[in-house]
Amino acid sequence: MTARYPLLLLVAVVVTVAAVTAYVVLQRRRAAALAGSPLAFSAASRRTAVRRHLPFALFLAALAPLLVALAGPQTVVEVPRVAGTVILAFDASNSMAADDVEPSRYAAVQEAATRFVRAQPATVDIGVVVFGPGALTTQLPTDDHDEAIAAINRPSVGGGTSLSAAILASLTAIVGEQVTLPDDEDAEPPDLGYWGSATIVIFSDGEDTTGRAEEAAALAAAAGVRIETVGIGTTEGTTVEVDGYQVATARDDDRLASLAEITGGTYHQPQDTAALDDIHRAIDLRVTTRPEPIELTAPLAGVALLLLAVGALLMIRWHGRIV
């Protein structure tokens, strides 16, 4: 514990000890004066002594916390808070133009992601990654959430889908250096260090045209980064027109669930646009703690006032007045 005015702590100790000492001395003198009285040790006199001493004992007990409160005491406690880095990764492939989610998969994602950003406290840095056959970081992690929202509303759809590119680009934004998978799948993956306060949120229909997404997810898990996946579209699917051809597309729940599970995250399956808009309520971000000073003046003053009030009530009840 610390105090804004530490000298007053010494004053509190000296004054409290002096007050208690003075009261004890006075009572001993009084007891010595009554030593010859035949009632000095009677039961009635003991009851009277309790009634006489207890209120004053409460007054003296209130003195210490009251004086300590004047010193401005503080203590440091670990306060939980939502903090860290969140990368929002958006599937901007051709399939996201499908309208099985109104008005389209991608338009619904943009609105849901905007709600997500607005719901986050300033302690969360948010970055934006857009992916198709490759991935592009359109906004590095920032506590300026307006910049993140602007990045969300910037891209348009087109091309294929690479979930591995999405994860690798997100990890690159988190660690601050290029992250890639080794060409040889049996080779040792790179050591990214530990980033336990980081989360990647992938909005996608789960279709993947390049592979190696599970390896990228394992790399994220090794770095302590959790992946939350949000499924877009319906399992029944629909068709989209690509270069004059009708291409079938449907949500791949198994793949999205697998990527989340590898990192200890959760797969979220909003059933309609309204549920997608509320997705920010379903995604749990990392809760960390930070030390914060807590002022103890009010609690100590409250204890002192309670002791004074009880002492005063007992004094009035037993003696009819405060003496």
Image (cartoon, rainbow, N blue to C red):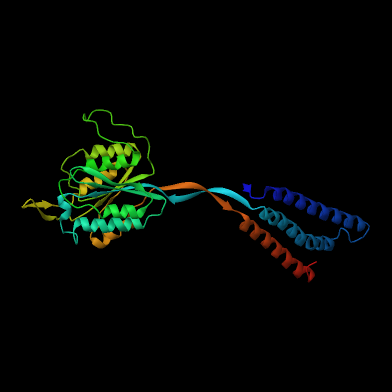
The residue lying at 17 percent from left, 47 percent from top is 207
Whether residue 235 is visible here, answered yes or no, is no
Q: Residue 79, position in %: x, y? A: 49, 50
Where is residue 34 drawn, in percent x and y?
91, 58
Is residue 68 among what the camera can see? yes
Viewer-nearest residue: 299 or 172: 172
Rendered position, 266 above or below 188? below
Position of residue 288 measured from the top left corner of the image (x, y, whole percent): 44, 47
Q: On the rendered structure, is 48 left or right of 101? A: right
Total residue callouts: 0
Which of the two residues, 37 or 172, is positioned nearer the viewer here? 172
Query: What residue sits 33% from the left and 44% below the top?
Result: 226
Q: Nearer the viewer, residue 165 or 248?
A: 165
Q: Is residue 178 toward the left or the right of residue 317 in the image?
A: left
State the residue lying farthest toward the bottom: 320
Give the percent coordinates (x, y) of residue 86.
34, 48
Quarter of the picture containing the C terminus is bottom right
Q: Is residue 287 above or below residue 311?
A: above
Position of 182 relative to 84 (above/below): above
Name the residue furthest right: 36
The residue that appears at 32% across and 56% down in the rendered structure is: 116
Q: Report the side of 290 relative to 109 (left or right).
A: right
Q: Residue at x 69, y 65 (%)?
A: 309
